[in-house]
Image (tube, grey):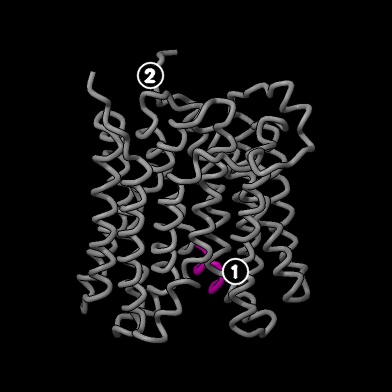
Amino acid sequence: MKPHRLWTGNFVLAIFVNLFLCMVFYLLVTSMAGYALTRFHTGQALAGLASSAFITGSVLGRIFAGKYIDLVGRKRALLITLVASIGVALVHQAVGGIWLLIALRFLHGAVYGFSHSVLMVAAQSLIPAARRAEGTGYFGVAGSLASAAGPAVAVALVHSVGYDWLFTAAAASSLIAGVFVIFLKVPERTPSREEVADKWRLSLRSVIEPGAVAISGVMFIGGIAFASVLAFLDTHTTELGLPGLAGWFFVVYAATTLAARLVLGRVQDRRGDDLVVYPMLVLAMGGLLLLAVGQGPAAVLVAGGFLGVGFGTLMPAIQTIVVNRSTPARMGVAVSTYFLVMDLGTGFGPLLLGSLAQAGGTRSIFAGGIVVTLLALVLYALVTRRPKPKPA
């Protein structure tokens, strides 16, 4: 095989696994609050907890994934967690109480977080180092497609045949992903004797890669801003008298993310990280500014384009930096650390910025997002700044 060949059969299979695995997330996470309200007649707070429990669980799954990915075996871990995902998805139909639903969502999130981290490590081992950013961008396109298709399929199923079929669809997505994994040849790494001897010994370093925390913090901060858009955009467009426009926003977001990732990964590989990361953060701030001050549908849709290129490209760009800075032995922990930190920002973002809505409405949330994204830019500059060489 050519050393820089990217488009192999295994890489294509991994992209399809990613597509159907991400579909599980987007099918359910966008519908759980409505399901809790409809099925159990609970309040908004518990309905929100039923939705966010998944993300909380995924954080736990990622914490342990980094340590045990290679101890279990990458392909074996993928198959085990996908089988578990099928079972957990189907059990949703039998849950009889809101607290059992919350516990199940937490468990499903943990299974998803573990399997997604394993898949990310497997994919990175399939991408030539010289084409890391390009390959990571292409691989992430599957997630972008799922982010557009998953909520649309969920809404269609709920309104046509009910929630039970939604859970069946999630189980079917896990099953299809598992079938692709069966045919996937995953490069494995043999753990060292020290790793095997310490497999039951947990320490902070065994589950967190210290060198990945600071650069991953850029996505923690970026995740706070972007998650607030996800959480409050529909409310914002309704307040503007444009109900339903949020759906078109995400279509534009997904399309521009796809287009940008097809191009900017190559730019990052050939011209360096800064030429991609700085402009993307500025574009993201531009999109948030349009949401904060814009009035009509054009401003909202253009904001979707700016944020699609900005935040949509920032995710694989920072992940590429994390992988390039890690050693092969620590890559699993580094990737898990990256997604763990990003998930924390995504999970707490609406809570942190949502409080601004009480003072100034949804526009204040997006204005706060601009400030947050500026902080991400400053953090990136500090983390990646290199000391100038001393004169000879």
Q: Residue 368 at x, y = what percent? A: 34, 71
Callout 1: 10 Å neighbours few (<14), some, many (20+)? many
Q: Which mark is residue 126?
A: none
Q: Residue at x 39, y 64 (%)?
A: 225
Chain-order first, disc 2 or disc 1: 2
Name the one closer to the observer, 89 or 264.
Answer: 264
Q: Residue 276 at x, y = what percent? A: 27, 42
Q: Is residue 144 left or right of residue 245?
A: right
Callout 2 amino acid: His
Label 2 belongs to which residue? 4
Q: Which residues are magenta?
A: 153-161
Secondary-structure class at tag 2: loop
Q: Is residue 281 left or right of residue 189?
A: left
Name the one closer to the observer, 192 or 239.
Answer: 192
Q: Residue 331 at x, y = what percent? A: 55, 32
Specify the quadrant that holds the C terminus: top left
Secondary-structure class at tag 1: helix
Q: Residue at x 27, y 40 (%)?
A: 274
Residue 193, image quadrant:
top right
Q: Mark 2 and 1 residues: CB-CB less than 8 Å, in contact? A: no
Q: Real-space Cα distance between discs 2 and 1?
A: 42 Å
Q: Main secondary structure of the magenta part?
A: helix
Q: Is residue 19 left or right of residue 84?
A: left
From where the camera sits, is residue 376 visible? yes
Label 1 belongs to which residue? 51
Q: Residue at x 50, y 69 (%)?
A: 155
Above/below status of 264 relative to 188: below
Residue 94, image quadrant:
bottom right
